[in-house]
Image (tube, rainbow, N blue to C red):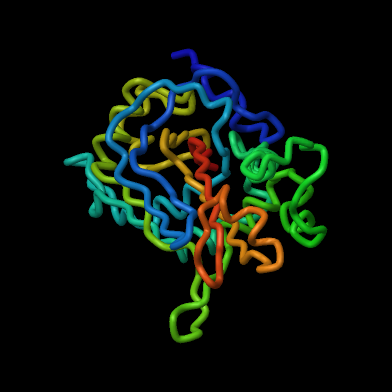
């Protein structure tokens, strides 16, 4: 049987998936916001998706497979038919060099800077109301792989001063045996052959598999400002600020699909 070529990019990590390709479908998603809670719900089906604007991350098959246990060749089932990957395991596994593309987040910082400027009627978007230190923190409007990696590994301070990983939640994949059998039957990614019988199923996840989560990652940016009382009378009418210690909170949420490229 002639091997399909759907996953021609998979062996060349310099290539970023563009356009529509087949993938395992994941539901749910990651959320990076005030609580930095992150959760991915079970894989439920297969589909073909436009992956152009997805965050693309290399993810090791060995980590997915070590949870499956032994394989029963009679029933074509793994001992464990479910995979759960904690946030701690995800952080331990994903390195900065594993991030191939930041997807739709590429212009997030620049868009947020414009959003804040426009809120205050500051239309000269080549400049900014942010301080120089804030500009450096926002990487001069560019959200790149380093920014995404740093965001994933952000830490928060608890109510009692304890330091916590900002990333929490888990990834869950159910009915893995049935899913792998279907992928083998269809040779969906061009990296298996049904002529090998259960051999490819026995191998579990392999190089070339794709897991796509349409609602993949949410990032919420916010800016909290305490206003100088000296300038408060100038703007209090516009913003209806009547507190003794007035603050303005600006937040905006961004979303990108997530593509895990199994290696």
In the displayed structure, does residue 150 sit left or right of residue 68? right
x and y percent of residue 194 in the render? Answer: 35, 23
The residue under the point 45% across, 86% down is 160
Identify which residue, 21 or 105, lies in the foreground: 105
Residue 236 place in picture, x, y as percent: 58, 56
Q: Position of residue 71 (x, y in %)?
A: 28, 48
Is residue 221 visible in the rendered image? The answer is no
Residue drawn at x 45%, y 55% as measured from the top left: 63
Query: Is residue 8 at all visible to an observer of this figure?
Result: yes
* Residue at the extreme bottom of the image, as rendered: 160
Considering only vertical position in the picture, is 74 above or below 65? above
What residue sits 51% from the left and 50% below the top? 220
Quadrant occupied by the N terminus: top left
Q: Quadrant of residue 102?
A: top right
- Residue 129 in the figure: left or right of residue 184: right
Which residue occupies 55% across, 42% down?
263
Provide residue 21's location: percent of width, then percent of height: 49, 21
Q: Residue furthest top?
A: 2
Task: Name the one closer to the observer, 41 or 181.
Answer: 41
In this rendered view, identify the residue nearer to me: 244 or 206: 244
Give the answer, above or below, for where 27 lies relative to 36. Answer: above
Foreground: 102 or 74?
A: 102
Rendered image quadrant of residue 141: top right
């Amino acid at each position: 049987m002639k091997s399909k070529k759907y996953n021609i990019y998979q062996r060349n990590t310099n290539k970023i998936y563009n356009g529509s390709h087949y993938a395992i479908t994941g539901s749910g998603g990651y959320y990076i916001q005030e609580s930095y809670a992150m959760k991915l719900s079970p894989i439920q089906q297969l589909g073909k998706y436009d992956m152009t604007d997805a965050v693309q991350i290399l993810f090791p098959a060995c980590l997915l497979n070590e949870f499956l246990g032994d394989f029963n060749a009679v029933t074509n089932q793994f001992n464990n038919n479910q995979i759960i990957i904690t946030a701690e395991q995800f952080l331990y596994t994903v390195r900065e060099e594993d991030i191939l593309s930041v997807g739709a987040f590429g212009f997030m910082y620049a868009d947020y800077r414009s959003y804040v400027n426009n809120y205050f009627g500051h239309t000269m978007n080549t400049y900014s109301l942010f301080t120089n230190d804030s500009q450096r923190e926002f990487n001069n409007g560019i959200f790149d792989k380093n920014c995404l990696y740093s965001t994933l590994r952000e830490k928060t301070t608890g109510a009692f001063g304890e330091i916590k990983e900002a990333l929490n939640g888990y990834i869950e994949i159910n009915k893995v045996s049935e899913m792998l059998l279907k992928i083998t039957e269809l040779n969906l990614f061009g990296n298996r052959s049904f002529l090998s019988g259960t051999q490819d199923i026995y191998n579990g996840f392999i190089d070339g598999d794709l897991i796509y989560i349409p609602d993949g990652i949410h990032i919420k940016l916010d800016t909290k400002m305490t206003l100088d009382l000296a300038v408060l009378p100038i703007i209090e009418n516009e913003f209806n600020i009547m507190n003794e210690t007035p603050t303005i909170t600006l937040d905006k949420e961004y979303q990108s699909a997530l593509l895990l490229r199994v290696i």
